[in-house]
Image (tube, rainbow, N blue to C red):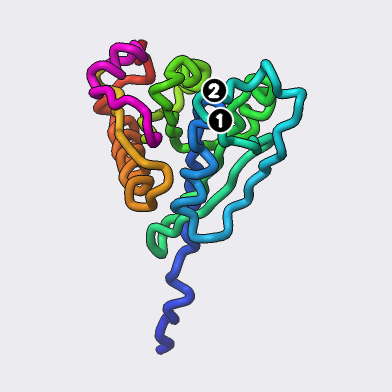
Amino acid sequence: MFGRSSTMTESPPIAVKIVISGGFGVGKTTFVSAVSEIEPLVTEAEMTEKSVGVDDTSAVSNKTTTTVALDFGRITLDDALLLYLFGTPGQDRFAFLWDDLVDGALGAIVLVDTRRIEDCFPAIDYFEEHDIPFIIGINAFDGARHYGLTEIREALGVAERLPLVECDARQRESVKSVLVALTERVLTRRLGSEPAEATW
C-alpha cells in the first residue's frame, strides 16, 4: 500500500580512517591539505629555539612550523564512503600521541623524503609491529636527487610486495593515486591473498 521512501532505504556513509605518517618535514600536512574537501584541521606551531639541534631542518630550511598533534582532512569518495585522513606529528617527542591517532585506522601511508630516508624507519616499524596495512609514498621535493624505486626499496630494506608509489604531496591527483594504492593494498590483505605485515 505504502511506497517505501528513499530516505528509509539509504544507509549512512561508511567512515574509513587513514593515517598519514613519516618523519619531520616530509610533507604530511601538505598531503592532507592537497586532497581534503574541507578546510583541513592542522595543529601547526611555530618552531622555537628549543627545536634547535633536535629537529633537522637542513633539507627543509624554509620550514618554520611543525605539527604538534595532528592534521585532519576528509574526502567523500561517493555516497557510501568517507575517508578521514589523520596526519601524525613527525618528531619522536610526540610519539606518545600515535596510539590514539592510529587506533581504528584501516591503513596508513608512510611518506619518504629520499634526502633523509632514515627518518621514515620509526613509522615503518610502528605499522609492522601493529600489523596495520601500509604503503610508502616517495614524496617529490624540488632540487632533490631522483632515485629509482629499486634503489629506494633496497635502502629501506622492504619486501617486493610492499607498494612504493612516487607522488607530489602538493598535487591533488598525485595524492589521490597514493590513496588508491593504499585501498588496493588493504583489499588485498582483507581478501586474504597477502600475509600479515612482515616487510623487512
Kind of residue at badge 2: Ser
Query: What SS does tag 2 mark?
Result: loop
Q: Which mark is residue 58?
A: 2
Segment colored magenta: 141-159
User: Which residue is located at x 50 percent, y 19 percent?
Assistant: 119
User: Which residue is located at x 40 percent, y 89 percent?
Assistant: 1
Is 35 a magenta residue? no
Q: From the viewer's perspective, is residue 57 above or below residue 64?
A: above
Relative horizontal placement of residue 144, taking residue 150 as reference (left or right): right
Q: Evaluate if marks 2 and 1 touch, with contact meaning CB atoms under 8 Å apart.
A: yes
Q: What residue did someone put label 1 on?
A: 61
Residue 173 percent location from the top left of the image: 33, 52
Characterize the local packing of mark 1: few (<14), some (14-19) or many (20 or more) Cα atoms within 10 angstroms.
few
Residue 131 percent location from the top left of the image: 45, 22
Relative horizontal placement of residue 137, taking residue 14 as reference (left or right): left
> Looking at the rendering, in which quadrant would you find the C terminus?
top left
Kind of residue at badge 1: Ser
Q: Nearer the viewer, residue 162 or 149?
A: 149
Q: From the viewer's perspective, is residue 96 above or below residue 45?
A: above
Residue 147 location, quadrant: top left
Is 151 a magenta residue? yes
User: Which residue is located at x 42 percent, y 80 percent?
Assistant: 4
